[in-house]
Amino acid sequence: MNYKDYYKILGVERSADEKEIKRAYRKLALQFHPDKNPGNNEAEEHFKEINEAYEVLGDSTKRQKYDQLGSSYKAWERTGGAPGGFDWSQWTGGAPGGVHVEMGDLGDLFGSGFSDFFNSIFGGSPAQGTRGFGQRRIRGRDIEQAVSISLTEAFLGTARILEHNGSRLEVTIPKGAQTGTKVRIAGKGQQGPAGPGDLYLKIRVESDPRFVRDGDNLKTDVEVDLYTAVLGGEGLVSTPKGPVILTIPAGSQPGQIFRLKQRGMPKMRTPDSSGDLYATLKVSLPEQLSSEELDLFEQLARLHPDGA
């Protein structure tokens, strides 16, 4: 497995703050978006890398782990470590107690999904095993086990592979799962005189800094500069399947909400149907203006003395 330098992919320094990272991502994603480069495989591959890099660096928890890995990897390189000799085990990790969890099918993100590097480092949250079985007189006790999944996994559907009583057990978690959803695995609970109970995986969907979930709908922000809001243009909207380009009409107002139909979460009982995504317009104002720009704004102010 090869180390991926996400900072290099986005063209930012390791010390870059959240705004710098987001600004670099938006610029590159618009430049290399498949809609702007039809049939250009090289641009599409670069777009996937950009999306993956922001998935990590735009999330404070993932970024912290990635930075720790990066420091360790750079230190190993400085010692003259041979290619392929880096010990990845402490970063890809399993879970204690003989329980192993693997990432299931993440679906097709822009053709091929995230890289093996991403899936190995950030691919899944370990389950906690099924210890501490008690004894019941009739049927074995049901066991409830908490499992965390990302919003992306909830969107695409995923799987967990557990080692349970010496056997490997693959559990499918359906698309559209929400926090509190229970997945039943019959006969895998406590053994009793009249047969085993069941194992229930209680799902917890981790928060995602890009979205607020409201049932099957998602809410997010789309950030544009002042000139795009005034004159019209394009903005980049995050969705669980990757960013899409949104046309911003001229004269759009801060706080204006755009509805993107069927871009929300799949409905668990009808996975071919989805909720909607609502994007709230955020307008960033220029922070440093030249004297010429200030003069132009003063002219505009005189043309519109009432501020309209």
Image (tube, rainbow, N blue to C red):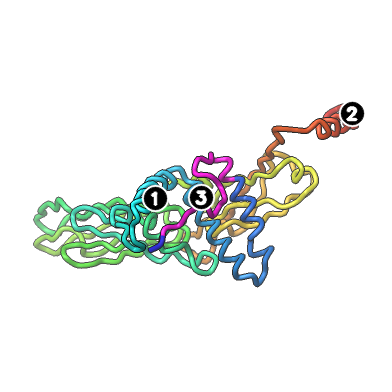
229 or 190: nearer the eye?
A: 229
Secondary structure of the residue carrying tag 3 is helix
Q: Label 1, label 3: how many angstroms apart (C-alpha)?
A: 14 Å
* Mark 2 or mark 3: whose residue is earlier in sequence: 3
The residue to which callout 3 is attached is: 7
**Residue that extends furthest to the front in the rendered view of this protein:** 80
Horizontal relation, residue 55 to residue 82: left or right: right
Magenta segment: 3-22
Q: Residue at 10%, 53% (x, y): give it.
A: 135
Q: Give the quarter of the image for residue 45.
A: bottom right
Secondary structure of the residue carrying tag 1 is helix
**Residue that extends furthest to the right in the rendered view of this protein:** 303
Q: Label 1, label 2: how many angstroms apart (C-alpha)?
A: 57 Å
The residue to which callout 2 is attached is: 302
Secondary structure of the residue carrying tag 2 is helix
Q: Residue at 32%, 56% (x, y): give it.
A: 92
Whether residue 165 is visible, yes or no, is yes
- In the rendered structure, which amino acid carries the disc numbered 1? Lys
Task: Please state which of the two labelled residues, at mark 1 or mark 2, is closer to the viewer.
Answer: 1
Q: Residue at 30%, 50% (x, y): give it.
A: 146
* Mark 1 or mark 3: whose residue is earlier in sequence: 3
The residue to which callout 1 is attached is: 74
Whether residue 203 is visible, yes or no, is no
Task: Please state which of the two labelled residues, at mark 1 or mark 3, is closer to the viewer.
Answer: 1
